[in-house]
Amino acid sequence: MGKVAVVGAGMTKFVRRAQETGRELAWQAARMALDSAGMTLKDVDAVVIGSAPDAFDGVHMKGEYLADGSGGWRKPTMRNFVGGATGVFAPIQGWYHIASGQFDTVLVVCEEKMSSCHPHPQGAFLTIFDHTTERPLGPNLLWIFAIEMNRYMTVHGITKEEIALVAVKNKRNAMDHPCAQLGEELTVEDVLNSEIMAWPVNRLDVSPASDGAAAVVMCAEHVAKRVTDKPVWVEGVGWHLDTAYWTNRDLYYPRYVEYAARMAYDMAGIKEPRKEINIVEPYDPFDYKELHHLEGLLLCERGEAPRLTADGVTQRDGDLPVCPSGGLLGVGNPIAAAGLMKVCEIFWQLRGEAGKRQVPGTPKRGLAQAWGDLMQVGAVIILGR
Amino acid sequence: MREKLTNPEDVRTWPGTIPVEYVYTAGVAGEAYLRAIKERGCLAASTCPDCNIDYLPPRLYCERCFAKTDEPRDVAARGVVETFTVAHRDLDGRPLEPPVIYAFVRIAGTAGGLIHRLGDVEPGDVHIGLEVEAVFRPPAERVGSILDIEHFKPVG
């Protein structure tokens, strides 16, 4: 398989309600990504679009709807959707478009406009559950994930205070992100005292609903060497699916994340992830999910992630910076765009272009991960320079 | 279940809905379009400075080259029927009485156009190439919607 590089990245501001349509947001991010690579639409052979359920934007066949704003006019274009994992799966799709030898340059664009869904996107989440066994109970993601969080806390004896440190860290990191929706200086007490949504989940444990788009430009080795002297290479990719019956699994551990990570580590030749990964952007729609995912990614032992957080290891200047962007908790969570934002962040960090968010030293390798559907899909991408 | 069911009620079912509602924004270019319709009783188009293509409805960007388009300009709501149909059934298959004429109208002086209803004309008198113009609702009744245009009618 051919080598594949990321050579450009762009994103819109993440906001609660954008005046721009989804396709206008997509264009802003895509244009920024192309400009940053010194390329134009003429250089693009194919387009990959990632967007989560049509029900968010309230537009059926959202891939077709977004195509012109994503650069898909008269080009081979496809849209993927694997729930919340979409934003990391989209560049994986870009990778195999190029690694296969079929295309030299691919524009990858992810968009979500969740403000369209009224009064709240939770209404769209209701119907992702089984209509016979669960929907009659009126499930929403807050209490579904509260159930998972409680299991995780109880199995390992983790406190809410330890978990709240993640929200404090990420919202503070987001203060340095020009596109962030919810950057804020908070204390653990602020998180614990915020409104209880579904115990043990309080309002500040959760990321917001957002509108936004993100994009990257990916290309084959011979193109990358021509257009940049700072290519960021795709070293590993992995994705994995567990059953939709979450009833037959133990929710304390995300096995689908581990399997996706193992696939990516194998491809990248990584034997000891804790030593060989320098920065991580795990998916953090809830604060406990950052910890849960660090464990699934084999970056620490099961139940150990809260201690890394308390010890400052995961701070931007720590030994293993985690969510230096500010994550979904701070930057915002336009589902697919949020996942790709994490890939953009690794790209900027590895190029030394992350501005005030730049982690110290010269990180050589970073990992972005997203998770989606019914606690079910894991997608992992490893980038290196 | 192998026997043939003639009555769908023989399979136990229950009704369900997907209960979502939406609020949409018009977007940057869409806002300019709806304001032209509501405030000035005309349409709007935007032009790509590089490709020199007129977009109607206006767009923020050119889909061909990704350039930002010029500011939308007003365009008279007049054009030519490029194709049309006469609908005799509604969304649910019920008879439409009278039938409704839907046309794609290419707007004069642009590369674009819009789909709308035709009125003040009998279906038998419509033909491809017919010149038409928009009939707007009275200014006080316009809300900033494509339905501020009641229909298109033959010119003259």
Image (tube, grey):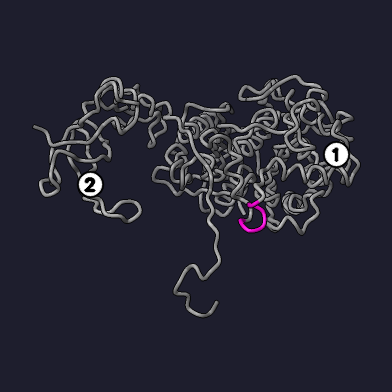
Q: For this view, does B93 lie left or right of residue A118? A: left
Amino acid type at image mark 1: Ala
Q: For this view, does A260 lie left or right of residue A158? A: left
Q: Which residue is mark 1?
A: A305
Quadrant where the C terminus of chain B is found in the figure:
top left
- Span highlighted in magenta in the image: A131-136
Q: What residue appears at the point 64 percent right and 25 percent down from the top-left corner?
A: A180
Q: What residue appears at the point 82 percent right and 29 percent down from the top-left corner?
A: A165
Do we see residue A148 in this rendering? Answer: yes
> Secondary structure under badge 1?
helix
Callout 1 touching callout 2 (CB < 8 Å): no
Q: Is residue B81 magenta?
A: no
User: Which chain is home to disc 2?
Assistant: B
Q: Which residue is mark 2?
A: B100
Q: Is residue A133 magenta?
A: yes
Q: What residue appears at the point 21 percent right and 50 percent down from the top-left corner?
A: B86
Amino acid type at image mark 2: Val
Q: For this view, does A9 lie left or right of residue B106? A: right
Instruction: Give the x, y percent position of residue A134.
Output: 67, 53
Q: Residues within 10 Å of mark 1 (few under 14, many from 20)?
A: many
- Please state which of residues A299 and A205 is positioned toward the viewer in this rendering: A205
Q: Residues within 10 Å of mark 2 (few under 14, many from 20)?
A: some
